[in-house]
Amino acid sequence: MSKIEKVLVTGRTHTTHSSAGKTARGHNGTLDIELSSPGNATPEHVLSGVQPHPKAEQLFAGAWSACYIAAVGLAAQQLKVTLPADTAVDLEVDLGQTGAAYFLQARLTLRVPGLTNEVATELAHNADAICPYSKATRGNIDVAINVRTE
């Protein structure tokens, strides 16, 4: 995999976990989406506050983070871990360039205040193994996975 020499644009999202659905919020509040899981009609898919032309990197980060936070919920169930109420994922996707070639890279931070670093790290990596977006990007782009427990 090639390393990006120059970042051209970054799409950022902050996605929270809740029993009523997930919310992806873009950097500077430019992307708010209410999502539901397959087979669950609540809440309806709602796009609000979306700029007329959001960055593709932001849309990708929003979709990926929504999928990933759902995978965190599944991983927590498997480990019999209760997720903190303020569990969240911050995902940044960079479009960058090395020479004349264009690449993507990403940074994913799982925020699970109150859990131990060991449990949080296990959740993050188990969710990465479950999430279809993580599987699709694995080996194709550089992805850093981080955890925050504070």
Image (spheres, helix red, strand yellow):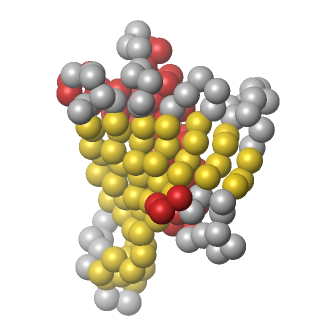
Identify the image quadrant of the C terminus: top left
Toward which corner of the image does residue 36 lie, by quadrant? top right
Name the spot of residue 29 as percent of width and height, x first.
Answer: 53, 58
Looking at this view, name the residue that lies furthest to the top.
Answer: 80
Q: Is residue 118 left or right of residue 22?
A: left
Identify the residue at image location x=66%, y=60%.
Answer: 49
Above or below, comparing residue 25 to residue 28 in the picture: above
Please say whether residue 135 is visible from this viewpoint.
no
- Give the image location of residue 7, x and y in percent: 34, 77
Q: Is residue 113 in view from this perspective?
A: yes
Q: Is residue 127 left or right of residue 50?
A: left
The residue under the point 36% across, 48% down is 108
Total numbered badges shown on the rendered structure: 0
Name which residue lies at 41% across and 20% down.
83
Report the residue that reaches farthest toward the bottom.
100
Q: Quadrant of residue 99?
A: bottom left
Q: Residue 128: percent from the left, percent from the top?
A: 41, 37
Residue situated furthest left in the rendering: 117
Residue beneath the point at 34% across and 36% down: 111
Quadrant where the N terminus is found in the figure = bottom left
Q: Position of residue 84 (x, y in %)?
A: 39, 22
Relative to 9, residue 125 above or below: above
Q: Which quadrant would residue 101 be assigned to in this image?
A: bottom left
Residue 113 lies left or right of residue 77; in this view the side is left
Q: Does residue 8 sit above or below 45 in this rendering? A: below
Q: In the displayed structure, does residue 86 sit left or right of residue 67?
A: left
Q: Nearer the viewer, residue 148 or 119?
A: 148
